[in-house]
Image (spheres, rainbow, N blue to C red):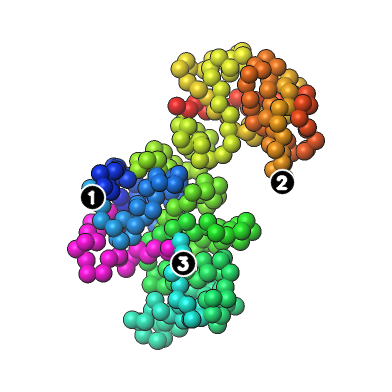
Amino acid sequence: MSILSAHSVGKNYDGRTVLQGVSFEIHKGEICALIGRSGSGKTTLIRILAGLLAPDTGEVWLEGEKLENPDDQLVPGYEEIRLVHQDFQLKHRMTVRENIRYELLSYVSDYQHERISELLKLCRIEHLQDKDISLLSGGEKQRVAIARGMATEPDVLLLDEPFSNLDINTKAILLEEVKEIASSTDTAIFLITHDARDAMEIADRLLVLDAGQLIKTGTPENIYHAPGDIRVADLLGLYNTLTVGELQTLLPNISPPAGHHFGLWAEDLRLDPDGFAATTQKVVFGGPYNKVVLSPHSLPHLRLWAFDHTKKITPTTQVCFSIKEDRLFPVT
């Protein structure tokens, strides 16, 4: 059974449709990530789920009960659903412990002490408990913000771009910690992000939003291997597009359906001494590997991306490549 669900949620601003017919559900202990371009409606949707904004159409349900319209509440929001904002919204001139305690002021002191200790341990910030918020790094502030969001034991934790301002190593650590929080507390976590790599790493289920509409849902693995839509593939990584004719020139024995284009992730076009001859047109340094642009001799107009993990290929180098046929995906 779902813990939180949206049913045909829609929202308009000044005659412009921001969300249209958005429906999905989240289950206990599940991490659900929503990705989309800037302006796709992600922030509007998370504010509706948090009870801070009323939808124009549709409904939000929690554990089988329809939630009240925020416009009908004295204080917008729901105790069972907590939103961690992108800017953290922590209390300055307070310590970490005092920030968490602020969320528990209506509880008796014994419970406050017990819950704060649990959260400090859960979010791995015990060593920071007496530090002033102003002295914390971005990653440390994010952990405190999550601890505050979890303070009242919500059923659903909403995270607004939780990793956008973090360095790579801090982000990797926090991704793992959020996974642990979901699994150890059975809390449903719904996050929005513009970085599909973060979403694919952390999410049990991925939702793709484009121009206010959900255009794809599924596990990260299933969506990555079969995006089905250029708008989805554009968010997920570097890929090549081939027409049916181009594909049949490279792979004469293949019989793809007519009227389609086909995508191939850059990592699935492999440098292979027994493959098709090509000329290197461009080399882009990429840290652990280089990105190279290849032009097949049989299709000199075509430009294909591949990864060179040897980092020995230079422009104009003659190389050979092969295509992992089972990794081709149709796109529209």
Per the image, label 1 sits on a secondary structure element best described as loop
- Please state which amino acid type lies under the numbered disc 3: Phe
Q: Earlier in the sequence, mark 3 or mark 2?
A: 3
Bounds of the magenta span? 58-85
Residue 167, given in percent of the width and then of the height, sits at 61, 58
- In the displayed structure, would residue 18 be above or below residue 247? below
Q: Circle 3 is placed at which residue position? A: 88
Q: In the rendered image, is residue 197 in sight?
A: yes
Instruction: Report the side of 7 relative to 138 (left or right).
Output: left
Q: In the rendered image, is residue 114 in sight?
A: no
Magenta span includes 149? no
Q: Residue at x 43, y 63 (%)?
A: 85
Q: Residue at x 46, y 64 (%)?
A: 87
Q: Circle 2 is placed at which residue position? A: 287
Instruction: Report the side of 59 relative to 116 (left or right).
Output: left
Residue 37, given in percent of the width and then of the height, sits at 45, 44
Q: Earlier in the sequence, mark 1 or mark 2?
A: 1
